Image: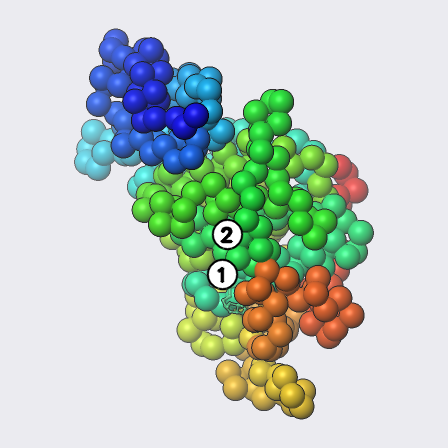
Amino acid sequence: MSVTQQQVLDALAKVASPRGVALTNAGVLSPVTVTDGKVFFSINVDATEARAWESVRAQAEAAVRAIPGVTVAMIALTAERKPGPAAPPPHRHAHGVSPVSAHKPPQSPASPMSKQSEIPGVAAVIAVASGKGGVGKSTTALNLALGLRDLGLRVGLLDADIYGPSVPRLTGIREKPQLNDDRKMIPIMRFGLAIMSIGFLVEEDTAMIWRGPMVMSAITQMLRDVAWGALDVLVVDMPPGTGDAQLTLAQNVPLKGAVIVSTPQDLSLIDARRGLAMFKKVNVPVLGIVENMSYFQCPHCGTQSDIFGHGGARHEAERLGVPFLGEIPLHMSIRTTSDSGTPVVESEPNGAHAAIYRAIGAKVRDQLKGAIAAA
Ligand code: ADP
């Protein structure tokens, strides 16, 4: 039996709002999307009202989840600050609310949202980020996760690249996550990793149109509403770039550190510098920089050519005083294995590339040892 939009609206009509009318009559709902038992919408209110609406969001979510046939309910509360003198002072926003401001991410690193998004059983959450798209961030995130796995760690991968989730392609995962008895999503197990991607839940173009606050809300929910189990490291493949959505994410996900992926070209390094600045701003330690597509390695003769002026990221890391984690060549087999759903660390475990990713993994693990041991 498929769930209809009308069923969702009927359920929401039974939820009261702080405006004294039913939620459906309060003028705050975005269009409701229902695809294949998965329900998505947002409740859009002003930042000054946000506290009063958090419980409404929770009630709306419970009401939607109670509809037979609903497998996923993602309901975002977006709190936009109206510009102008009437806007509340920033601290008004900092108590007991989970909404995200569209214009200004919450300023305190100890915001209650970060508490809310802590994940029981997960020792260390780390981000893999890049200043721009197409530098091989997702390929690096997955192969790094596999490298950490090879070191004997229990590892998860969350594809938070909501604008273009590529983990379904990189892993070949086609199935949808099921719900457990607590109605949490069970991550898909592949290559010994617990994997979750927004791409398992929505079509790629649905994800593309989400606004910043909804992105954050969806990602927070993927962290909270997934039964990750006991993990040493959860690798988060971040959306590329350093805009507001990324900054809010970096601030509100309880990150133990971040790995920045860059190519050697100057432009990409400038973007990587922005990434470093972003994590610094929100007090997330940068575990190091990875130079991807560092040099071209001929698939036939193995000859190395520095077509992009190899080594820029290493110098940049030295200059900025952050660790340099390693160089990954531009190699055909990294691309083909990646794009066929059989990442190189998995399909060529004894090859040179797998060794590079494992060495990067070891440097990351060494920096996380304290957190892993404490857990
Ligand atoms: P991003 O996440 O930064 O957008 P992807 O990881 O999706 O980038 O990689 C973009 C493309 O580059 C993919 O086709 C991928 O297979 C390829 N790629 C990534 N790293 C390498 C590499 N070291 N050598 C060859 N191809 C690579």
CA gap, disc 1 to disc 2? 8 Å
Q: Nearer the viewer, residue 117 or 314?
A: 117
Reading the image, the residue beneath label 1 is 130
Q: Residue at x 46, y 24 (%)?
A: 69
For the N terminus, the image quarter is top left
* Nearer to the camera, 314 or 11: 11
The quarter holding residue 47 reads: top left
Marks 1 and 2 close (CB-CB < 8 Å)? yes
Residue 177 percent across, percent down from the top left:
57, 38
Query: In the rendered image, is residue 196 in sight?
Result: yes
Task: Determine the secondary structure under disc 2.
Answer: loop
Q: Is residue 276 visible?
A: no
Q: Which residue is mark 2?
A: 238
Q: Nearer the viewer, residue 135 or 302?
A: 302
- 370 to the left or right of 67: right
Q: Which residue is pictured at 73% across the width and 63% down the height? A: 358
For the point 48% across and 71% down, which residue is it? 269
| Ligand 1 has an atom within 8 Å of the beta carbon of the residue at disc 1 | yes
Q: Is residue 197 above or below residue 37?
A: below
Tell me the amino acid under the disc marked 1: Ser
Against 259, residue 263 (above or below) is below
Q: Quadrant of the C terminus?
A: top right
